[in-house]
Amino acid sequence: MRTATFLLAATLTGLLTGCGGAGPDTPAQGVRAVVVIRWPEPARMVPLLAQSIVLEVVQTGIFSSSQSVGRPAAGGTSEVRLENLPAGALRFTATAYPEPDGQGIAQATATQTLTGAAGDVLEVRLTMASTVTRYELSGSGLTDGAEAGQYSLRITSGSGVDVTVAAYDGDGYQVLVPAATWTVTSGSEYTALAWPTAGQCTVTGTASGRAVVQVVSQQAESGSGQLVCELTVDVVTLPTLTLTPPASPIYPLQTVTVAVSATWDPSRPLSDYNYLRVDRNGDGTDDETIGFVGGDDANGRSEFSIDLSWQPYGSGTYHLKAYFEDGYGQRAQSDTLVTIAAYAQPTLSLTAEPNPVYVKDSITFTASATWDGNLPLTWPATWLTVYLDRDGDGDYDTYGNSSGTGLTSATVSLTPSYNDLGVGTYTAKAWFTDNAGQKAEAQVVVTVAASGVDVTIE
């Protein structure tokens, strides 16, 4: 079991039980919290006449519950155990009232948020009889500054962060103080402030730039003077990325242009190169990566546009994804599906004239090929050949007038002549391969007959 101890806190979600409950070593299904309240002696009224404290536990959108804790007649301390609280972010709000059971006008309050996991024990300590020695700020993304009471925060324009203010005494107890104890000011056009609840304000970025938010006490505490917390807020714009695919139709082996444009906050230079990635077979793995502008190439700028060359290798659907990361580590992504059309299959025909043919007469083979007009053909990548099986063994001999040529038009004819064949049947074949590697084949059977001259002897 893990035990987490916090000085004051916060938002809890779950079932609130009264004093007592499970012992410290009793297994619990959820988060447990122990709230220790230190009351003033009867002669000290800080806050004035506080007779009860209402503990409220909230998990936004999931749970809200509260209970009242009465002040002992002789002062001292009270302990409240909260069992089976759900894991997650829990907000404690403690409010002091002048009458028992939380009746009357609220005198003081304290709020803070804690996070607990199953099995954690959160210790919450409250006091109503101490001198405030410091304020502390908390909230998502806040980091401590170089000195006590200084904090920093980076948010994007248009987003907001809830910042909680808490007062502590020298022993680490959070002090319940009146809601009007402090004021919050920004003094900058880059942020806007809202104060929805006592002890908590919302800082919202309105424009890119730096703002300083100050939390100042309104009452000087004994021996400490005025207390100030300072929050430096950097408001940055989110990067954007636009990916424009090439116009359709797109065919394999064609070099196409992919347009990529990005914008980012210029207050920090880009730190690295960015990438266009291509998933060729739809398996979620990037098969190709094309780097584009980044680092020093874009320093001092806030936008760019670039055209990237890309050559798809085959037909099908490709997933193009572009990623861009600014100097703050904020990422923008744009993606699109691109369909690559398939080339039409080539065709091939082969004829022989005349057929049948007599021995010693000439025969001409004509091979005609067609292919997809969108596919550029270049020699010698594409080849058209005609071969003849002269001896009938199934092997197509290179003997004779086999020919090859580069192709520059949709149809080509070859006319190899064979005039030394004996009587019999022969097979001629032609092959054609286009630049996409697609093949076509054709054949013709040729009959060679004896001479047609008849000789009569009387």
Image (cartoon, rainbow, N blue to C red):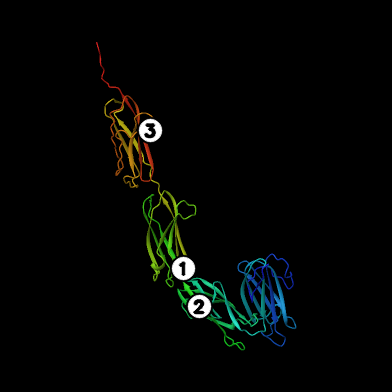
Measured in 3D between alpha carbons, the distance from the residue under mark 2 to the one under mark 1, in whole angstroms, is 19 Å
User: Against 196, is 287 above or below?
Assistant: above
Q: Are marks 2 and 1 in contact (CB under 8 Å)?
A: no
> Residue lying furthest top in this view?
458
Of the residues under marks 2 and 1, which one precedes in the sequence? 2
Looking at the rendering, in which quadrant would you find the N terminus? bottom right
**Residue at the disc numbered 2:** 232
Relative placement, left or right, of 358 versus 102 is: left
**Residue at the disc numbered 3:** 395
**Which kind of residue does numbered mark 3 sit on?**
Asp
Residue at image x 45%, y 73%? Answer: 208
Residue at image x 67%, y 77%? Answer: 125
Relative placement, left or right, of 107 versus 22 is: left
**Residue at the disc numbered 1:** 238
> Residue lying furthest left in this view?
458
Which mark is nearer the camera, 1 or 3? 3
